[in-house]
Image (spheres, coloured by chain):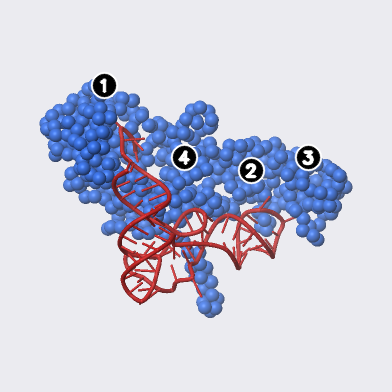
Chain colours: A blue, B red
Amino acid sequence: MKLAHERYPDLLETKKKEEHVLPDLKNVHGPVVMRMAPSPSGPLHLGHSRMCILNDEYVRRYGGELILRIEDTNPANIFPGAYEMIPEDVAWLGVNVTKLIIQSERMELYYEKAKELIALKKAYMCFCKPEDFKEDLMNKRACPHRDTSPEQNLQAFDALLKTCPEENPPVLIIKTKLDDPNPALRDWIAFRVIRVKHPHTGDKYHFYPLMNFSVAVDDHELGLTNIIRGMDHLNNTYRQKYIFEYLNWKVPEYFHYGLVNISDTILSTTAMRKGIDSGEFHGWDDVRLATLRALKARGYQPETFRKYWIDSGLNDVNSEFSWDIFNSINRQFIDKGANRYFFVAEPVPVKIMGAPATTSKIPLYPRDDARGFRTYEMPENPEVFLNKADISTLSDSDEIRLKDLYNVKFVEGTCLFTSAENSGPKRQIVHWAPLNASQFKLIMPDGNEITGKLEPEAAKVKGIIQFERMGFVNKIDETHALYLHR
RNA sequence: GCUCCAGUAGUGUAGCCAGGCCAAGCAUAAGAGGCUCUCAAUCUCUCGACUCGGGUUCGAAUCCCGACUGGAGCACCA
C-alpha cells in the first residue's frame, strides 16, 4: 500500500475523488434519439436545466440525436421571445442540440393522425359541456357521442377545421377504458379549440392538440428511442401509450425521475411574467428569478449546472434542491479565476492618527504574487473607509489589522495607529478602502441593494471577482455588481 | 375520495436489480483545529442515516407482506 502510494499517487488521488456517474439507460441498442420539450412560456430556468443536462449527457454517452422540441400548441400560454431565448439558453448550458422542432409547424401531421384514429374508432368528437363530460368520466359513463360513426366524426372534424362555431365548440377525445380504476387514464381530450392568435402561425389554426396527443405523435414521428422525464408525467406516459398501441407504433423506453423541489427563488413563468409586466422585476434576468439568464448574470457557470445534475443522478425519489451544494460546486469553478478586491459596505470614514506615510501592496490573489497587486500610496494620518459593523463592537483595548496596511485601535472614539508589522498576537483582520474609493452598489439575490465604497483599482474591472470577507460577485460595470455567493 | 410512485445522516447521493466484503462510502452543511495578512481556497478531525413491524434466510439497507409517511396525477396547461 505504501509502495502503491509512492508509485501511483495520482491514481489513488483520482480514486479518492470518484466522480459520480449517471446510471445506464435501459434498452439502448446503438445510438439514441432523445428530446427536450419545453413550452415557450418564457426562457429556461433552473428546473429546465436538469432535463437539458440529463438528456445531453446520455446522447453524449451513446451517440445519436438530441432534439429540442418547442411545444407551442397552446397559443394562450406563449411568450413570443421564448422562441429565440430557449435555444440560446440551451446553447449556453453547452448542450449539443442536433435538431430543432416547433410543434405549431406540424399541425397538419397532428390532424392526419387524428383522422386515422377516428377511422379506427379510437377517437370521437364530443359536443358535451365540459362539466358534463367530466362528470361522465368520474362515474365511468360513456358520453352520448362516444359511439358516433367514424364517418360522422370525420365530417364533424373536417367541418371544425374549416369553420369554428362561436359557442360550445366540440373537442376530440381519445377512447381508452372508461372503467379504468385510475381516473386520469379514462377517455382523454386530444384537441380543443383555442381562439387566440398564435405568435408563430397567426390565425391559420384554431383547433389545437393537447400535449398528450402532439407529444405521442412527435415522439413516434421523430423516432425517439429513450425518453427521460419527471414523475409528474407518469400518467401522461400511460395516456400516450394508447396512441402508440392504436397506431401500432413501437413504444420508446421511458424513464421517470423524481421531482426536485427548488425553494428560495421564483420558478413559475407566469409569476415571472406578471412581475416583469408590473415592473416589479426589471426583466427575465432579474437576480430574484431562477432563470438561466439571471443565474448567468450573477456568475453561475454552465459547468456548475452539469456537475450538479449529474451528481443528483436519476433517482426516482423526489428531492430538495440544495443551493449549498450548487454554490459549492460553482465556487470550485470560479475561485481560481476570481481576483480579490475590497468593497466596504456601510462605510464609515475614519481618520487614523499617528500613522506614517506608507505603501499598501495587496495581492490580487492570495499567495500568488505572479498575478499582481493593488497598490495604494497612503499619506500620513490618512482617512479610510471601514465597515461600520467591523468597528462598532470594538472596545478600547482591541487592536485590529487593516489588511495589508497596518494595525490600529480605537481609544475613546479616535482611531490610533499602533504598529505596522503583522506579527505578535492575532488580530481581527478587516478590509478597508482609501478615501478616493468610488460609490458602489452591490445587488443581493433577494433584490436588496447594498451601497458602499469600492477600492479604486477595482473600478474598471469586470466579471467575477471576490469581495474579500463578503463573497463572490459578478461586476457588471463601474457602478454595480451582482452578488453571487459566499 | 380514486390511481400511481417512492422512503439511506440537516441536505444531495452511493449501495438495493444479481442478500454476506455495509458495525453503511462520498459530497455539502454544522462543530473543532492546522495553514493563511479574507469570513475564500486548502488540510486534519468530529457530528450525523438504512421509516416502523412482521416474514424468508445461517445471514436483510438489499427479497416478500403490512402499516406509516411523503410525493405526483385525476385540466378543453406542459
Residue topped by disc 2? A461
Crowding near pointer 4: few (<14 within 10 Å), some, many (20+)?
some
Q: Amino acid at mark 4?
A: Leu
**Marks 2 and 1, Cα distance to the nearest angstrom?**
62 Å
Instruction: Report which quarter residue A436 is drawn in.
Output: top right
The numbered disc on residue A349 is 3
- Same chain letter for marks 2 and 1: yes
Residue topped by disc 4? A267
| Residue A280 screen position, x and y as percent | 54, 30
Give the mark, 2 or 3, whose residue is nearer the N terminus: 3
| Residue A425 screen position, x and y as percent | 79, 60
Point 29% across, 36% down: residue: A210
The numbered disc on residue A411 is none
Q: Nearer the viewer, residue A347 or A370?
A: A347
Point 61% across, 49% down: residue: A486
Q: Amino acid at mark 3?
A: Pro
The numbered disc on residue A167 is 1
Give the mark, 3 or 1, whose residue is nearer the N terminus: 1
Residue A360, compared with residue A195, is above or below; it is below
Residue A405, compared with residue A445, is above or below; it is below
**Marks 2 and 3, Cα distance to the nearest angstrom?**
24 Å
| 4 and 1 marks in contact (CB < 8 Å) | no
Crowding near pointer 2: few (<14 within 10 Å), some, many (20+)?
some
| 2 and 3 marks in contact (CB < 8 Å) | no
Mark 3 secondary-structure assignment: strand
- Same chain letter for marks 3 and 1: yes
**Marks 4 and 3, Cα distance to the nearest angstrom?**
41 Å
Q: Amino acid at mark 1?
A: Glu
Give the mark, 2 or 1, whose residue is nearer the N terminus: 1
Point 17% across, 27% down: residue: A156
